[in-house]
Image: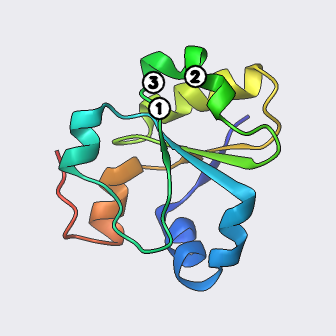
Amino acid sequence: MIEQFTVADLADMLDNQPDQLDGWQIVDVREPWELERASIRHAAFRCSAIPMATVPLRSGEIARDKKILVMCRSGGRSMQVANFLAGSGYAQVYNLQGGITAWSREIDPGVPTY
């Protein structure tokens, strides 16, 4: 079962525990146009942009020795990718519950919803 990671958890880590980010890889599985439209704006935030359809081909870009947080617009695509990664042997995979939409609603209303 994939564990859910809330946007509040992510905001707390970015604001108060940025040193923990070294142990994580955030994978955003949205399309490039979606990233241009709405993204997390935080000095400590880094992510790997790997659109969902390309994850099987690009899984080598996803670290096996880190915790993986998968995100998308609302949490559906990221959950599918998280399940794929867990089934492919990734040990610690998390889904960003509610995705960028939840981030906009709960953390930064300046991030547009779409």
Q: Quadrant of residue 74?
A: top left
- Tell me where residue 102 appears, x and y as whole percent: 35, 57
How has the structure been colored for display?
A: rainbow
| Circle nearer the N terminus (1, 2) | 1
Element on which disc 3 rests: helix
Residue at horizontal 79%, vertical 37%? 64
Q: Which residue is mark 2?
A: 58
Q: Quadrant of residue 33?
A: top left
- Tell me where residue 45 appears, x and y as whole percent: 48, 65
Verify CB contact (< 8 Å) between mark 3 and mark 1. Answer: yes
Give how far apart the Cα atoms at labels 3 and 1 are. 6 Å
- Tell me where residue 3 appears, x and y as whole percent: 68, 46
Q: Is the N terminus in the top left, top right, bottom left or bottom right quadrant? A: top right
102 and 63: which one is in front? 63
Horizontal side, residue 10 vs residue 74: left or right: right
**Crowd around label 3: few <14 · some 14–19 · many ≥20 (10 Å):** some
Disc tally is 3
Mark 3: amino acid = Met
Q: Which residue is mark 3?
A: 52
